[in-house]
Image: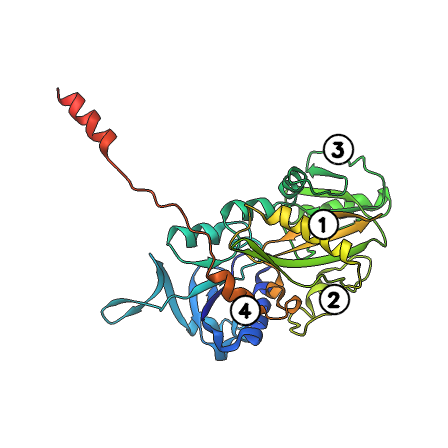
Amino acid sequence: MKFDVIFGGVSFEHEISIVSAVAIKKVLGDKISNFIFLDSSHRFYLIPATLMKSKTFSSGEYKKCTEIFLQRGSFVKKSLFGFKAIIPNTLISLIHGADGEDGSISALLDFYHIPFIGPRIESSVMSFNKALTKIYTQSRGVKVLDYEILTRNSPNPTLPYPLILKPSRLGSSIGVSVVNKEDELEYAKDLAFEYDDSIVVECFKSGVKEYNLAGCKIGDEFRFSIVEEPSKKEMLDFENKYLDFSRTAQVLKADISQELEKQIQQNFAKLYENAFEGALIRCDFFVIDNEVYLNEINPIPGSMANYLFEDFALVLESLAHNLPKKHSIKVSYKYIERIHHAKGK
């Protein structure tokens, strides 16, 4: 089975998306037919596999590649006699942050009837906004840490220090700060407000256990990755998370009990069910006093968390054959015709 990959987008995570696409090329190889780059002008370019290198994009060389356009059912390129369709395959969405995880690309692909692996519109909007994620998570019966939402005119948080401040609609640890005392708060707020007008504030728990689990639902069955215990400092900043972002080797399974692994999987399933069908997501959890808490939902994880799966390609192929189908709506003009006839009498 062949795939196409779409990446780029206009967001603070634009470069991460490029690195993610390069990484997945190494993993899937010739299973990928087309690489589609969405640049900062919202133009689509068809990138040959041989040019899937960071320099292609940083130098602007990608602009020499074929520009392509969306039509119903496929991308197309200009030809001598009009437009020629690019043979469509199931599209893998690798646009991180805005344009991708905020639901924009999902809406566009749905509108043009392009089959894709990725979060749908509603789940994108919910998981992109950390404040909405908190509300959603609690509604699904999954625990979250105590939190407050700050806007620019809000009073300072009332939670006890230390605190962690995060822009509400941003990932990749950008704009995130740990605040140990009150005189550090204003700087952290200024930093977060550079990226968003809303901030999520949580109590920062030092030394807690953190576990990551990726997966998807295929038919009636969940396909889970291994549970990873990331090796990290107190908090991973942008550089620590992404300088080695393109890793493709599998990581070791966390040394945890079967009972805890099952609890993590059950919480994942609560969050995924009837929300993220069609997507391969990663949930990051905290475990505090044997209780599982959601840290965040990654609707399009970096390089789609391929390193957590024994057979990543097989999982993608199975998911591609089980994508959600939209209900078709037959448009009728009976009501308008009845009004017309009524007025004509």
Q: Nearer the viewer, residue 112 or 272?
A: 272
3 or 1: mark nearer the eye:
1
Residue marked by disc 2? 253
Picture coordinates of residue 130, whole percent (x, y): 65, 45
Q: Which of 174 and 288 is in front in this view?
A: 288
Distance between the alpha carbons at the discs numbered 4 and 2 = 19 Å
Picture coordinates of residue 3, whole percent (x, y): 46, 68
Q: Earlier in the sequence, mark 4 or mark 3?
A: 3
Mark 4, residues whose alpha carbon is within 10 Å: few (<14), some, or many (≥20)?
few
Amino acid found under the numbered disc labelled 4: Leu
4 or 3: mark nearer the eye:
4
- Check the image and name the residue furthest to the left: 345
Provide the secondary structure element on which disc 2 rests: loop
Amino acid found under the numbered disc labelled 3: Pro
Amino acid found under the numbered disc labelled 2: Lys
Q: Which of marks 1 and 2 is nearer the N terminus?
A: 2
Q: What residue is at 24 percent from the left and 72 percent from the top?
A: 80
Residue marked by disc 4? 314
Provide the secondary structure element on which disc 3 rests: loop
Amino acid found under the numbered disc labelled 1: Asn
Q: For the residues labelled 3 and 1, say whether their Cβ atoms are less than 8 Å apart.
A: no
In the drawing, what numbered circle is on residue 308? none
